[in-house]
Amino acid sequence: MPWNWQQKHWPNFTYDTGKMEPLEREFAHLLGTVTGAMKHLEEQDRNQIIVQILSTEGVKTAEIEGELLDRDSVQSSIRRKLGLSTVKRNLQPAEAGMAEMIMAVYQDYESPLTKRELDGWNAALMQGRTDLERIGSYRIHEDPMQIVSGGIGNETVHFEAPPSKGVPRYMKEFIRWFNGSLKTLPPLTRAGIAHLYAVSIHPYEDGNGRMARALVEKALSQSAGAPALSGVSRQIAIKKSTYYDALKRNNQNLEITDWLLTFGKTLITAKKYVLSSIEGILQKAALYGKYFSELNERQKKVIDRLFEAEPEGFVGGLSAGKYIAITKAKRATATRDLQKLVNLGILRKTGKRRHARYWLAA
């Protein structure tokens, strides 16, 4: 069967609006709840949640593509770009580029989408890359742009994008559609179509998935009239196989109800995480209000990480080894720090000796 872009009526996607309406209503309600909760945060706490969500999105959108970024570096760069810190770190190109794109989407969401903006995102993401023919501009190579798995001789082609010569025309149509759809489509539907439409064209040599998720953020922010802080990449990273399966099921057909329902539910779950993160900030503020003077910087750093990992928490719980990895403390110091957190009632402990694990107390 031909790919979606080879269909006669491309790019006129069809879907069941009735099935999407309940999701659109639920998302609108969550958006209002999150907006209200953000207004109740102190400025310092509000900035913290913004930095936390943006840096998590940067790390997770890269992780989906198999790229591991240093979270502290991404977060430090975002804090500096927001004017919350003057500390300059020597960042690797990948971390610096990711922070640059994340902040461009966050700060410039209101502006109409342009090729120049997309090229800027790609140039930022591909900083330091020497293996690409084109950075910050559409691909031009004649070889098929394919998504392939399997070893040589046993390859499986999951998708083949349009030839490079057609990309400028397809992208001109996409940009026109994106800007025109703001007033005609509800948020989840528009964001879901934008993602599938963009990855189907696959306009750049690399970075297309990360940019498609950035387009989701821009689309939702425009619909909300404020930065969306969607948390979408974090949720996709948790359910990565579901995400890729849904893309695969919908790349040979223009009827995309299945994709929109799957992606819409993903965005709703992501928004619930954002809400729980805000609630966590309030809980942490109450905890620090009571114990701040009794905690050292190592303990505060770990408590911050534990709250950031909610609601799932650390996989397998916090161990002494993880405490050491986060704080660079010696084992004896880590043991004392953890025991004090247990004595204060901040953490609860399960298991003994090397099997000991620590969790935020309820």
Image (tube, rainbow, N blue to C red):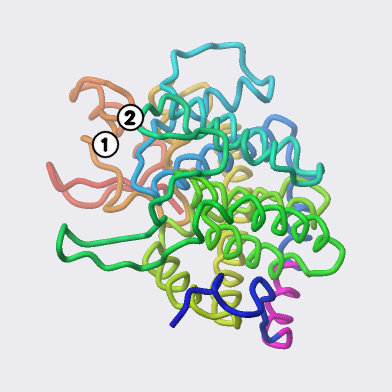
- Which residue is under mark 2? 326
Image position of 208 with respect to 95: above or below: below
Residue 341 image point, x, y percent: 37, 35
Q: How many marks?
A: 2
Specify the quadrant of the image occupied by residue 145. Answer: bottom left
Please give the name of the residue rendered at 69% of the width and 42% of the height, measured from the top-left corner. Answer: 115
- Which residue is under mark 1? 322
> Which numbered marker is on residue 41?
none
In front: 339, or 111?
Answer: 111
Residues rendered magenta in the picture: 17-28
Residue lying farthest to the right in this orientation: 183
- Does the segment drawn in magenta span residue 344? no
Residue 209 image point, x, y percent: 49, 52
In front: 112, or 243?
Answer: 112
Q: Judging from the image, what secondary structure is the residue with disc 2 in?
A: helix
Residue 266 image point, x, y percent: 55, 67
The answer to whether the residue labelled 2 contacts the one labelled 1, judged by CB atoms less than 8 Å apart, is: yes
Assign the magenta stretch its main secondary structure. Answer: helix
Residue 73 image point, x, y percent: 45, 25
Give the amino acid at mark 2: Ile
Image position of 232 with respect to 126: above or below: below
- Does the segment drawn in magenta span residue 21? yes
Image position of 231 with respect to 78: above or below: below
Image position of 147 with respect to 52: above or below: below
Please give the name of the residue rendered at 47% of the width and 23% of the height, measured from the top-left corner. Answer: 294
